[in-house]
Image (cartoon, helix red, strand yellow):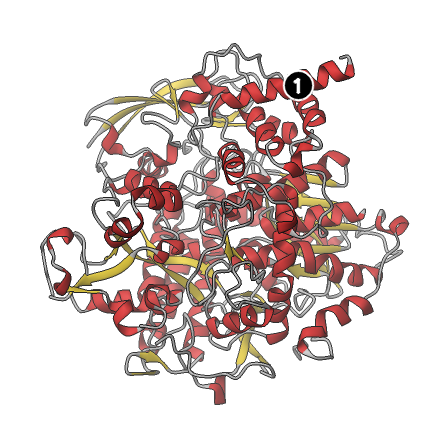
Amino acid sequence: MRLDAKIPDGPLPDKWSLHKSRIRLVNPANKRHLKIIVVGSGLAGASAAASFGEAGYRVDCFCFQDSPRRAHSIAAQGGINAAKNYQNDGDNVHRLFQDTIKGGDYRSREANVYRLAELSTSIIDQAVAQGVPFAREYGGLLANRSFGGVQVQRTFYARGQTGQQLLLGSYGALSRQIRSGTVTMHPRSEMLDLVVVDGQARGIVVRNLETGEIERYAAHAVVLATGGYGKIYYLSTLAMGCNATAIWRAHKRGALFANPSFNQIHPTCIPVLGDSQSKLTLMSESLRNDGRIWVPKAQGDGRKPNDIPEEERDYYLERKYPAFGNLTPRDIASRAAKEVCDEGRGAGPTGRATYLDFRDAVARVGRQVISERYGNLFDMYRTITGIDPYVDPMLIYPASHFSMGGLWVDYNLMTTIPGLFALGECNFSDHGANRLGANSLLQACVDGYFVIPYTMTDYLAGERGKKPLPTDHPAFDEAAKGVDEQVRHFTTNAGKRSVDSFHRELGEVLWDSCSISRTAAGLESAISRVRDLRAEFHRDVKVPGGADRLNPEIEKAGRVADYLDLGELMCHDALQREESCGAHFREEYQRDGEAVRNDEEFMYVSAWEYQGPGGAPKLHKETLEFEYSTPAVRSYK
Amino acid sequence: MRFHLKIWRQERRDTPGKMVGYDVDGITADMSFLDMLDRLNERLVDKGERVVAFDNDCREGICGQCSLYIDGRAHGPGHATTTCQVHMRQFEDGDTIHVEPWRARAFPIISDLVVDRSAFDRVIQSGGYVSVHAGTAPEANSIPIPKDRADRSFDAATCIGCGACVAACKNGSAMLFTAAKVSHLSLLPQGRIEAQERALKMVAQMDREGFGNCSNTGACEAVCPKEISIEHIGRLNWEFLKAALSRGK
């Protein structure tokens, strides 16, 4: 298989507009006869479904939650980047492009990243027109703030609930199309297989989560917008239902999986408090605009934080990275936190935490201003921990947060299966080895509102006149049978262990060996531990309650089964990449504590092909070429 | 800590339900209420029993999916919070805790503690948006909006659609939910244009779904996790009245 990214000709800044002017169109009368399936209703899925519906296609949209408005985009706190240069601080499209390429440690595709930066300005216009109540200045114009890894203010925000407000905007657009009859919404439905005939995506099989029925849907194209898989570590900032199931099952049907081990560990989350916690709550990166991160200089300093004098505190990010200080990119901040805790200088009852301190900010601008900026985050922190961050510094520690890896897609966001597209976090395309803050909402919106409506039309122009696959086709029978057998296996297996117990154990293995830092020995041992755990899972999992009804244990079992497969692939990927880049830090490849990239040998995207159960995954490489940026040592000093 | 739970168990929409007692132990004060229910479910799995179904997802108070009536109060003890942000330190060791689903005519029970809130989606579908085309829009800063107005709009837009307002209301009214959307959009110039039409359509849909009328008790505001004020109901009434009068309805 040769990977063709289908990057259009022409100078980088003109590629997208040239491409748009060349792609084929479908006339309105024909659009009515073309069906599109969209799986996922977050920012990428809802905006894509709404755009398709408005264009006149017939759309079926699926989500596992009870309403499309619950998708995990809703939890994004900090903001969305756009190169509007409203602050007149030297920002432009080229700078956002450069920041994103550098932030991703030169492991992303220039053409995609440029398009992301170029379309960033339109998304703010779109959201404002929909009624998204972004923060404003007293003069009535839009306000901005800074995020990690950049030196301009280009982040638009709606208090600490930017994702919620953007998602409700696209949920409104989706609702409007549902009302007009162009989109049929299927909530409480989980995609469990992809139907591929003659190498082309032709439909999906889903389980109705309320009744347990296995349902079949055919279409001319299938769009996956199913989010990230950071929940694979069990403890993460993600929602409980976040999963890799749709993309993993597509992978098993032939879609290549790119850079699976590039997983972002977010530096500022509420630390682990006990052994029965189900999630780690994110404290937005925006807090690093005003909060200062530190640990005691001395090991095992047991004093309360406010009793430790200034000269005995180590503001380690400001010390090591004076140019960016507390706003260094996430991968670097996470690693630095792990280092100081490994040195025995960690804070809090477990020693696995650092302080995020607002004392100086409150003294500088006053409690009122800090409350306006971060009030809801401070309240959330106090509710969960019982600590008041206006008085005592927050305790924070890194946690799994975002997957840069995902299904491999070309410039048109099409996977290696024709007719199957992947948008937003579930593809690999824009963030390289590390995502910059506030670029996630951006990518989801840009993919859904501004890219896929064009590239899908080009694809569907070739499908005109074809009928959707009949749902009694043998390919549907085979897929539905497989899904049914898996559900039946779970519910009838005479096992002893709960699904969650397997998920927690998998999470511990991956957190130890394939998260903030990795070693060859650790990864090799993790691969064999994951294999053993997978065998035990299929032998010993216990799912009571029956299949023909709402049964959350069945949903979790399917997701954990896929995580057990994906976990092994993540370790293979991390083992094969013998360099350090972005979130992928191999301890063997470092100099003076900083990551050492190997551009000679690893300037490519690793795209893995599934080789059947137990088969060794096959690697395909998409070589990355840098025309407009020069891969350099990423310095934030 | 240990607790005695009394939980509503109901297998399906059309089967009868009842309160069933369970004991849980090994609970710590730091655990969230849903961590505690996870613990109970893990014990039920051990015993080979069907787990208690309850809606939840983000577990950080923003997705609006969790929805329990805990000891007779929507989202449990505490103020301005969702069930997922309730922690066991808010209870006394040995307490008996009653856990029930939202109860309202427009929210039929699907199973155990899970209810069907799709009526909310249909209320939004009837007009809870600005009718702009996807993919094209004027320059964002061409529409300046006074900061306090944008802030007030946000205060309404922050609604998470959990349904606590309906569950707490003796009439099962969705006025606070509907008013929050009407208010969010009508406070902004972009949403002003359709404000009256929107109020008429959303109220009509609300009635069709079987939500009750508002009798201004303020119970909705008291349990709203996002502290949405019943002042917004005043704005909805105002928009509705203007629209009804101007159309002679």
Instruction: Tell me which corner region of the image, top left, top right, bottom left or bottom right, holds residue B33.
Output: top left
Q: Nearer the viewer, residue B44 or A287?
A: A287
Percent position (x, y) of residue A160? 43, 46
Image quarter in which the C terminus of chain B is found: top right
Q: Is residue A491 left or right of residue A530?
A: right
Q: Is residue B232 left or right of residue A325?
A: right
Q: How many marks?
A: 1
Q: Residue at x 28, y 59 (%)?
A: A292
Image quarter in which the N terminus of chain B is found: top left
Where A526 sits versus A126, above or below?
A: below
Where A610 sits versus B189, above or below?
A: below
Provide the chain ID for the residue under circle 1.
Answer: B
Describe the element under mark 1 as helix, strand or loop.
helix
* Residue A235 visible somewhere in the drawing: yes
* Residue A610 visible somewhere in the drawing: no
Percent position (x, y) of residue B52? 41, 31
The residue under label 1 is B240
Q: Nearer the viewer, residue A267 or A407?
A: A267
Identify the amino acid type marked 1.
Answer: Phe
Where A481 sits versus B157, above or below?
A: below
Residue count near mark 1 (Cα–Cα under 10 Å), binned few <14, some 14–19, many ≥20? many
- Please, which residue is most extreme toward the bottom here? A600
Q: Residue at x 24, y 68 (%)?
A: A316
